[in-house]
Image: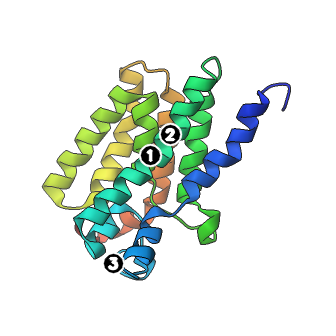
Amino acid sequence: MGALLPLGLIAALPVAGLLGAIPTGYALGALLSEVDVRAAGSGNIGATNVNRLLGWRLGALTLGLDAAKGALPAAAGALLWPSLPAGGLLGLLAFAGHCWSPLLDGKGGKGVATAAGVGLVLAPRATLGALFLWALVVGLTRKSSAGAVIAAAALPILGFAFDEGGRWVVLALALGVLLRHRPNLERLWRGAELGL
């Protein structure tokens, strides 16, 4: 593998995964309000549940930090190794770290904000289109998960339509977000999903 990838990129792989694995919503709840966000609301560590339990300021901070966890490794990879798919690789590792965090025994968030951070760096037009759909659906349904599912389903289509270099990345991100939202899909089908 060393012959195929620069040593710096190999060293960056676990760093990206560990950066993504930092459970920002859980940490903010524990440090600033002594609330375990995994034990209330939807039980998710992401911005929607943090907003629901701790208010919009901490929800917005969680959203921004989770997006940055994806954007920073993706941008670093793209800048440092532009001839390689390093941005996508590092971004996807950060996304995986967030969704299946070793710091939370393999559990984690739904990945929407982290995926958006990666996508805004590597496939900005497709990601902005998906974010518009997310906002539209959330505005109509008041359910973040419904917006996430629609946006994730549309993301690969938008990636191919805009002929962006990050097609394979947005496809992988979309599949990951949809996989993480399977329980939400079941609750949406039953009409039991929590609102904002």
Query: Which residue occupies 37% across, 65% down?
Result: 184
Question: Badge 2: how crowded within 10 Å, few (<14), some, or many (20+)?
Answer: many
Label 2 vs label 3, nearer the camera: 2
Residue type of the residue flagged with mark 3: Gly
Above or below, 190 against 131 in this view is below
N-term mark: 2 or 3:
3
Q: Is residue 194 left or right of residue 113?
A: left
Q: Secondary structure at mark 2?
A: helix
Q: Using the rendered image of the protein, determine whether residue 14 is visible from the camera's viewpoint.
A: yes
Q: Is residue 82 left or right of residue 7?
A: left
Whether pointer 2 and pointer 3 mark residues with C-beta atoms closer than 8 Å, the reply is no
Q: CA distance from mark 3 to mark 1?
A: 24 Å
Q: Position of residue 93 (x, y in %)?
A: 61, 45
Determine which of the numbered discs, if any, sits on residue 68 in the image: 1
Above or below, 38 against 150 in this view is below
Q: Nearer the viewer, residue 159 or 115?
A: 115
Q: Position of residue 80 (x, y in %)?
A: 61, 25
The residue carrying mark 3 is: 41
